[in-house]
Image: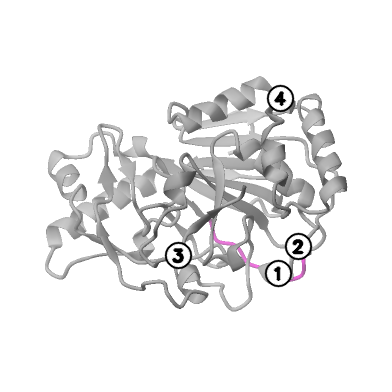
């Protein structure tokens, strides 16, 4: 999907050079002052400058925070001037200042929809995460896979305090590999029997292996939860790659399979170019990625990810593995 969107559940906003200039000027000033986007207090200062963004953008994202807006918002802009350098072969090898301007643009926009949080168990607890292919992980169902579809999912579905909003910014995407999205509208007309089953805690959701890799305290056992909750426009808790049902519970397994087929049929492909970003309501939409062949030559697809919450106190509270989701203050 490029250009103006008319897909239900997806809103697309295309900004002009004139509209992004005040924000770019602010970002360059902050990069010159701080050198990177990792400095404590920087995002708090940045949040006070929402006036540099066009009102039509801030109004749309305020609607996301109130859950009145579209579950998926695509924000396009002219490509930024700043060069991020080659796509690193691993997230640990990214230069600290390489993506500073892009990170601040991502944060400035995304913070109109929520407050940034991160995980101690992901990428050394960094607030901004890299989504890029890593050699040896080509078949992984994570943001570092490449050769297979990344199945649609809710971010960190296993955790009760998962983020409310996920924002993805494109740094590089030469092959226009699509991010796939579908929203809860795909479930219109779901049968009453399936709806009842899917609202019962019959679905075991395993942690993403990225969380388990760096944490000795993370519990690798599934959490048993419903995959639908809320009213007639339910919230989703769907991650097919890491979801199971109890042995013999064929009714729940079949209901979940039908749910997944509905979401699969509704997937829309969003092709991001440099500077474009997508803001996803993590309770009302799922996301994934089309497969691609990695080159490992510095030209591969590279996104930056920021997760956000509507309630910092809730997100900073107790998780079942005893650690915390961190908020930048």
Q: Gap in Å between the C-alphas at discs 3 and 1?
A: 36 Å
Q: Gap in Å between the C-alphas at discs 1 and 4?
A: 41 Å
Residue 2 visible to the viewer: no
What is the residue that sits farthest to the top in this orientation?
55
Residue 329 part of the magenta-drawn span: no
Mark 2 vs 4, N-terminal side: 4
Residue plotted at (65% across, 21% down): 55
Quadrant occupied by the N terminus: top right
Residue 145: percent from the left, percent from the top?
55, 67
Q: Return the residue at label 1.
A: 295
Q: Return the residue at label 3.
A: 323
Mark 2 vs 3, N-terminal side: 2
Res 51 label: 4
**Residue 35 vertical placement versus 18 (above, below):** below
Label 2 with label 3: CB-CB less than 8 Å:
no
Mark 3 vs 1, N-terminal side: 1
**Residue 37 vertical placement versus 132 (above, below):** above
Q: Secondary structure at mark 1?
A: loop
Residue plotted at (74% across, 27% down): 52
Report the span colored magenta.
290-298
Label 2 with label 1: CB-CB less than 8 Å:
yes
Q: Secondary structure at mark 3?
A: loop
Q: Return the residue at label 2.
A: 299
Few, some or many residues within 10 Å of mark 2 (<14, 14–19, 20+): some
């Amino acid at each position: 999907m490029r250009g103006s969107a008319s897909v239900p559940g997806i809103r697309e906003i295309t900004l002009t050079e004139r509209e992004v200039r005040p924000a770019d000027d602010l970002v360059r000033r902050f990069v010159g002052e701080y050198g990177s986007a990792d400095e404590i207090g920087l995002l708090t200062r940045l949040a006070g400058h929402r006036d540099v963004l066009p009102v039509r953008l801030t109004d749309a994202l305020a609607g996301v925070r109130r859950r009145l807006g579209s579950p998926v918002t695509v924000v396009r802009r002219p490509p930024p001037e700043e060069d991020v350098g080659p796509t690193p072969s691993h997230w640990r090898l990214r230069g600290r200042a390489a993506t500073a301007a892009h990170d601040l643009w991502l944060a400035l926009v995304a913070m109109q929809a929520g407050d940034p949080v991160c995980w101690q168990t992901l990428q050394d607890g960094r607030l901004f995460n890299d989504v890029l292919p890593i050699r040896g992980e080509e078949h992984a169902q994570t943001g570092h896979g490449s050769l297979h579809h990344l199945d649609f999912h809710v971010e960190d579905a296993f955790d009760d305090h998962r983020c409310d909003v996920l924002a993805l910014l494109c740094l590089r995407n030469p092959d226009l590999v699509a991010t796939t999205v579908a929203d809860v509208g795909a479930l219109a007309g779901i049968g009453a029997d399936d709806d009842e089953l899917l609202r019962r805690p019959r679905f075991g959701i395993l942690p993403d292996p990225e969380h388990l890799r760096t944490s000795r305290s993370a519990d690798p056992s599934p959490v048993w939860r419903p995959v639908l909750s809320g009213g007639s426009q339910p919230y989703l808790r769907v991650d097919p790659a890491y979801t199971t049902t109890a042995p013999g519970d064929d009714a729940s397994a079949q209901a979940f399979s039908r749910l997944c087929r509905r979401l699969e049929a509704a997937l829309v492909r969003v092709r991001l170019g440099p500077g474009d970003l997508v803001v996803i309501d993590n309770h009302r939409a799922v996301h994934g990625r089309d497969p691609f062949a990695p080159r490992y030559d510095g030209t591969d697809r590279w996104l930056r990810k920021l997760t956000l919450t509507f309630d910092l106190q809730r997100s900073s509270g107790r998780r079942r593995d005893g650690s915390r989701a961190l908020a930048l203050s």
